[in-house]
Amino acid sequence: MPHLVVYASEPDLQGREADVISALTDAVVAVYGEWAREIAVVQLVGIPVGRWGIGGKPAKDPAPRVTFGIKDAAFSRPDADDIVAGLVKGVTEALVGVFGERVRAGTTVELVGTPAGRSGVGGEVVLT
């Protein structure tokens, strides 16, 4: 299942949580298809002002960072480059749509592949 963890400044997130969740879910669906809507997981982590550093100093206006968990097998598909590009672009555009153009240049999207058999749901190992 697509699983996105978004780290953003608390002031940016406050009052926009539903918009971020909706926009990111739509971005996932744009790449994977409508079947992914019901299983896309978005977690928002608000970082208080002064608790995010860049270059050894507190960041004044940090852009969001997204860790996007997907199945490792996605990286070996013939269309893997298109999937990666579509997810990175779609997630970035979704966040720009909510937070504004100022976050584009610094938004980071990290795709993390989980090999089959290395995760579980409901107490059972997922083998696919």
Image (cartoon, rainbow, N blue to C red):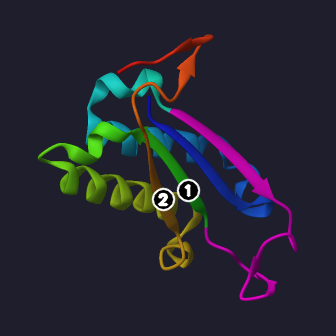
Amino acid at pointer 1: Val
In the depicted view, which residue is nearer to us: 51 or 121? Answer: 121
In the depicted view, which residue is nearer to us: 25 or 71? Answer: 71
* Displayed quadrant of residue 122: top right
Mark 2 residue crowding within 10 angstroms, few (<14) / some (14–19) / many (20+): some
Question: Does the magenta portion include 48?
Answer: yes
Location of residue 103 in the rendering, given as x and y in whole percent from the top left corner: 55, 73
State which region is magenta.
Answer: 41-63
Q: Which of the image's four quarters has the C terminus? A: top left
Location of residue 69 in the rendering, given as x and y in whole percent from the top left corner: 48, 42
Q: Is residue 51 left or right of residue 126?
A: right
Disc nearest the viewer among 1 and 2: 2
Vertical placement of residue 1 versus 88, above or below: above
Mark 1 residue crowding within 10 angstroms, few (<14) / some (14–19) / many (20+): many
Secondary structure, mark 1, is strand
Secondary structure, mark 2, is strand
Amino acid at pointer 2: Glu
Q: Which of the image's four quarters has the N terminus? A: top left
Q: Which residue is mark 1?
A: 66
Q: Residue at x 69, y 60 (%)?
A: 8
Q: Residue at x 61, y 46 (%)?
A: 5
Question: Does the magenta portion include 7?
Answer: no
Vertical placement of residue 55 versus 123, above or below: below
In the depicted view, which residue is nearer to us: 113 or 14? Answer: 113
Which residue ends up furthest to the left in the rendered image?
78
Vertical placement of residue 29 versus 109, above or below: above
Q: Residue at x 55, y 58 (%)?
A: 98
- Which sits earlier in the primary sequence, circle 1 or circle 2? 1
Q: Is residue 52 left or right of residue 100?
A: right
The answer to whether the residue labelled 1 contacts the one labelled 2, judged by CB atoms less than 8 Å apart, is yes
Q: Which residue is mark 2?
A: 110
